[in-house]
């Protein structure tokens, strides 16, 4: 029996380490350039998924 997913919810939390937010887990803090690259990649992937959903 196939399962149909009608909606996908994507949630992203971006913290500002300088303002007291952010995470220090792992090997250390992530630089601003790395954060920007990560956000751009996420946006590109979401847009790609949305374009695929619009194709007949």
Image (tube, rainbow, N blue to C red):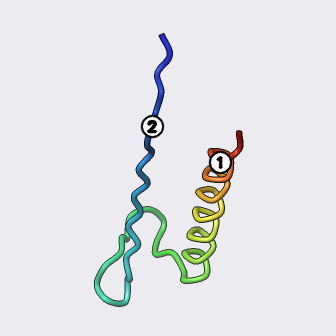
Looking at the image, residue 8 lies above or below residue 29:
above
Residue 23 placement (x, y as % from top left): 36, 70
**The disc label shown at residue 8, or none:** none
Circle nearer the N terminus (1, 2): 2
| Placement of 3 over or under 50, stated as above or below | above
Secondary structure type for disc 2? loop
- Of all residues shown, which one is farthest toward the right? 56
Q: Are circles 1 and 2 on residues that touch, CB within 8 Å?
A: no
User: 30 and 27: which one is in front?
Assistant: 30
In front: 12, or 22? 12
Q: Position of residue 21 (x, y in %)?
A: 31, 79
Across and down, in percent, residue 28 comes to 46, 72
Q: Residue at x 59, y 57 (%)?
A: 46
Residue 6: which numbered mark, if any?
2
In the rendered image, which quarter is residue 14 located in?
bottom left
> Residue at image x 45%, y 37%?
6
Considering depth in this image, is 8 or 25 the residue closer to the camera?
A: 8
Instruction: Count residues near mark 2 (Cα–Cα under 10 Å), then give few for <14, some for 14-19, many for 20+.
Output: few
Q: Residues within 10 Å of mark 1 (few under 14, many from 20)?
A: few
Classify residue 36 as left or right of residue 21.
right
Q: Name the residue: 37% across, 76% down.
A: 15
Residue sitting farthest toward the top:
1
What distance separates the C-alpha of mark 1 from that of mark 2?
A: 13 Å
Q: How many marks?
A: 2
Disc 1 element: helix
The furthest residue to the front:
56
Determine whether 36 is above or below 47 in the image: below
Rendering coords of residue 38 (x, y %): 58, 68
What residue would you read off at disc 1? 54
Question: Position of 2 compared to 44: left or right?
Answer: left
């Amino acid at each position: 029996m196939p399962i149909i997913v009608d909606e996908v919810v994507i949630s992203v939390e971006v913290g500002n380490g300088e303002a007291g937010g952010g995470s220090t887990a792992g090997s250390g803090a992530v630089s601003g350039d790395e954060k920007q690259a990560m956000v751009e990649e996420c946006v590109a992937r979401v847009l790609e998924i949305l374009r695929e959903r619009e194709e007949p």
